[in-house]
Amino acid sequence: MSPSPEYPEPHLAPPSIPSAIVVMGVSGSGKTTIARALAERLGHDFMDADDLHPPANRARLAAGTALTDADRAPWLDSVARAISSRVAGGGRIVVACSALKRVYRDRLRRAAEHMVFVHLDLDRDTLMQRIHRRRGHFMPQSLLDDQLATLQPPAADERAVIVRPLGPVADTVEQVISNLRRIA
């Protein structure tokens, strides 16, 4: 793993940090950025679940059509298999994945014991500003309201932490790690 300006050297995760962490939230919440930085900081592998979307899902989203549960099911199964494979081999992974509904998280949770979700929680205006600024992403701004309506924040009985990623990425990552240690 190569050093980055934010983290000069990677740090290995303490044993209390879970081997499977899913950074979740709606489009524009910073899932990929935070998950990648968290993985680097902990010495975990990183995976962006969007990379596993089949072409049909990407085309639907790019056309402004929201995915149905039936559209998401095979994708979530692919994500779960990738997590399971990594963890079963002794690896540790941080995944960026929307995981908007509890049933989606339950589907992913079967992949790794003690999986923890990190919900990046932001208000609609901030999300809209972020989506407007990014370029080249297949998820259009027009689907944000659908995602917000679909979102079921983690319930009290789920292994999850909630953070508001408003400051520098490094600060958000440290906040996530601090919260992960509390629930481990």
Image (cartoon, rainbow, N blue to C red):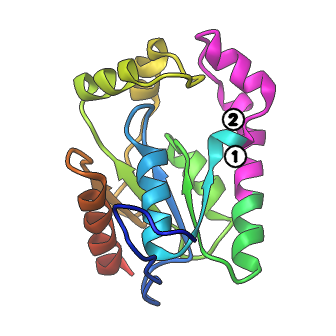
Q: Amino acid at mark 1?
A: Leu
Q: Secondary structure at mark 1?
A: helix
Q: Quadrant of the C terminus?
A: bottom left
Q: Quadrant of residue 91?
A: bottom right
Question: Foreground: 91 or 121?
Answer: 91
Residue depicted at x 41% and y 40%: 152
Q: Quadrant of residue 19?
A: bottom right
Q: Is residue 66 left or right of residue 7?
A: right
Q: Which mark is residue 72?
A: 2
Magenta residues: mostly which secondary structure? Answer: helix
C-alpha separation, residue under disc 1 versus residue under disc 2: 6 Å
Q: Amino acid at mark 2?
A: Arg
Q: Quadrant of the N terminus?
A: bottom right
Q: Which residue is mark 1?
A: 76
| Residue 114 to residue 121: above or below | below
> In the rendered structure, does residue 57 fall within the stretch colored magenta?
yes
| Residue 155 to residue 152: above or below | below
| Residue 17 to residue 23: above or below | below
Residue depicted at x 54% and y 68%: 2
Start-end of magenta stretch = 52-80
